[in-house]
Amino acid sequence: MYASALEQNLSNPGACRIRAVIGAIRPCMSKMQTTSRSRFTLGERDFIRRELDMFFSMLPTVAEGFQLKTWRGGPNAGKPKVSPTAGGLVERGLMRLDTSQRLPRLFFTEAGLAELRAMMADGRLADPKKFAHVRQELGIDPID
């Protein structure tokens, strides 16, 4: 009788723990979606969060792009220093490199902006309070 009552109560969130304790054979399945809609890799999400986080009490904008450093000497003198993570974003067409200004910058493409919106809309991937300025710029949250 106890086992049949347990089987009927499988939708209970604590049922997985109960079945694990009594040694039930069937595995527990979570109804929560574990995959995110963002195609950014873990390293790319970290790179984007670092670039869009507060810097010396200034909130950066997506429209300004990500400023890159340049090589000062050697065979690459004057060329932008592109990290492997940023290079991957450029190769995949999610960002573009603009060298027309004095300091080179990375800008999101249309596909990259769509992915950034998906990332910022998911509170698990980007803290809604910390990145409220980005969420407002992308039109996810209303402007106060």
Image (cartoon, helix red, strand yellow):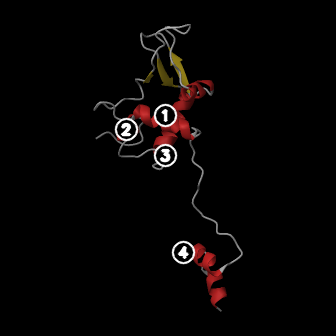
Query: Which element type, helix, strand or loop, lies under badge 1?
Result: helix
Task: Name the image quarter holding residue 87.
Answer: top right
Horizontal side of residue 64 vs 71, given as left or right: left
Please indicate, yes or no, whether residue 11 appears anywhere in the rendered image.
no
Image coords of residue 16 (percent x, y) = 60, 73
Mark closer to the observer (3, 2): 3
Q: Indicate the amino acid at tag 2.
A: Gln
Disc 3: which residue: 125
Disc 2: which residue: 136
Query: Which element type, helix, strand or loop, lies under badge 2?
Result: helix
Image coords of residue 106 (percent x, y) = 49, 22
Q: Residue at x 56, y 30 (%)?
A: 85
Task: Name the image quarter holding residue 115.
Answer: top right
Q: Earlier in the sequence, mark 4 or mark 1?
A: 4
Quarter the N terminus occupies? bottom right
Q: Earlier in the sequence, mark 2 or mark 1?
A: 1
Disc 4: which residue: 14
Image coords of residue 56 (percent x, y) = 29, 30
